[in-house]
């Protein structure tokens, strides 16, 4: 049973650049949520995708955008990177947008220099 | 606005003893609470959850207690094992109109179980 997978594992970018992170949900799951975890903090909700639409958004600027594909996989895009965007980006999947149990992938560690 | 708080950054217990991790929340509209465990370089792993209409849920060595009047929940691990050493996050589900929802996390408690 394939769990949530994310790629890449690590990424180093320069300020002002753009980045795309990828996530494949757990087998059978159709909903993907993205979270940002800064050092020493808990994960913070960025947005949720269900039926290829953004359903709910956290307190993040428009520089953060996403997409969900027909196979339920998802991408997170961040434009005009800032130093403060350095964090662990976590993808979580669930069965249905209303499911409370979310299963997390290993994350992508983004470093902005 | 920290809606979910874990006031103890770290906790150290002896192997075989009980570990008690605490969490406080401010939003009375949360309807589910979850505990996740996180090892370094891994994503959070779901441990146990509790509905807001219950006051206790048990799964093996893990028990979660919910005190709604105090807006407080706790995770008990009995007996504690060295493999339980990890960061534990408390999370609450905030439900919005329709079917969408998000999890709001505390800042985590680092549990160290000493052999």
Image (cartoon, coloured by chain):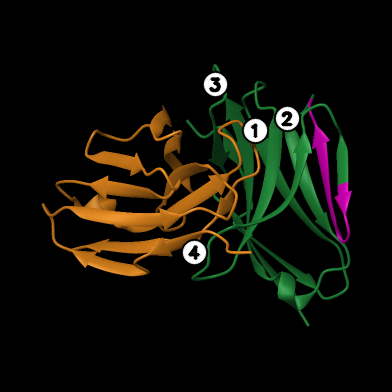
Chain colours: A orange, B green
Q: Nearer the viewer, mark 1 or mark 3?
A: 3
Q: Secondary structure at mark 4?
A: loop
- Tell which subunit mark 1 falls on: B
Real-space Cα distance between discs 3 and 4?
Answer: 27 Å
Q: Chain of mark 3?
A: B
Considering the image in quadrants, where does the N terminus of chain A appear? bottom right
Q: How many other residues sit within 10 Å of disc 3, few (<14), some (14-19) or many (≥20)?
A: few
Instruction: Identify the image quadrant of the C terminus of chain A.
Output: bottom left
Q: Between disc 2 and disc 3, whose residue precedes?
A: 2
Picture coordinates of residue B25 (x, y %)? Answer: 64, 33
Task: Residue at the far bottom: name it.
Answer: B115
Labels 2 and 3 positioned on one and the same chain: yes
Gap between marks 1 and 3 measured at Cα: 18 Å
Give the foreground label among 1 and 4.
4
The residue at which mark 1 appears reads as: B25
Residue A34 falls left or right of residue B32? left
Pointer 1 local density, CA inside 10 Å: few below 14, some 14–19, many at least 20: many
Q: Residues within 10 Å of mark 4 (few under 14, many from 20)?
A: many
- Residue B71's tag is 2
Question: What segment carries the magenta color?
Answer: B58-68
Disc 4 target residue: A106
């Amino acid at each position: 049973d394939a769990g949530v997978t994310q790629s890449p594992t690590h990424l180093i970018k320069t300020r002002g650049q753009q980045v795309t992170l990828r996530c494949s949900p757990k087998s059978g799951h159709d909903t993907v949520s993205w979270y940002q975890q800064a050092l020493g903090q808990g994960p913070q909700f960025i947005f949720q995708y269900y039926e290829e639409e953004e359903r709910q958004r956290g307190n993040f600027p428009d520089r953060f955008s996403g997409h969900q594909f027909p196979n339920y996989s998802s991408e997170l895009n961040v434009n005009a990177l800032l130093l403060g965007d350095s964090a662990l980006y976590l993808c979580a999947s669930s069965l249905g947008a209303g499911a409370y149990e979310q299963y997390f992938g290993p994350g992508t560690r983004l470093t902005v220099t | 606005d920290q809606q979910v708080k874990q006031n103890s950054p770290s906790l150290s217990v002896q192997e075989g003893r009980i570990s008690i991790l605490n969490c406080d929340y401010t939003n009375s509209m949360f309807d589910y609470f979850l505990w996740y465990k996180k090892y370094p370089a891994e994503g959070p792993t779901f441990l146990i959850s509790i509905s807001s209409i219950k006051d206790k849920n048990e799964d093996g060595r893990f028990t979660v207690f919910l005190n709604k009047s105090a807006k407080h929940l706790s995770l008990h691990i009995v007996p504690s094992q060295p493999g339980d050493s990890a960061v534990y996050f408390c999370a609450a589900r905030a439900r919005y109109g329709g079917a969408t929802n998000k999890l709001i996390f505390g800042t985590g408690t680092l549990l160290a179980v000493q052999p």
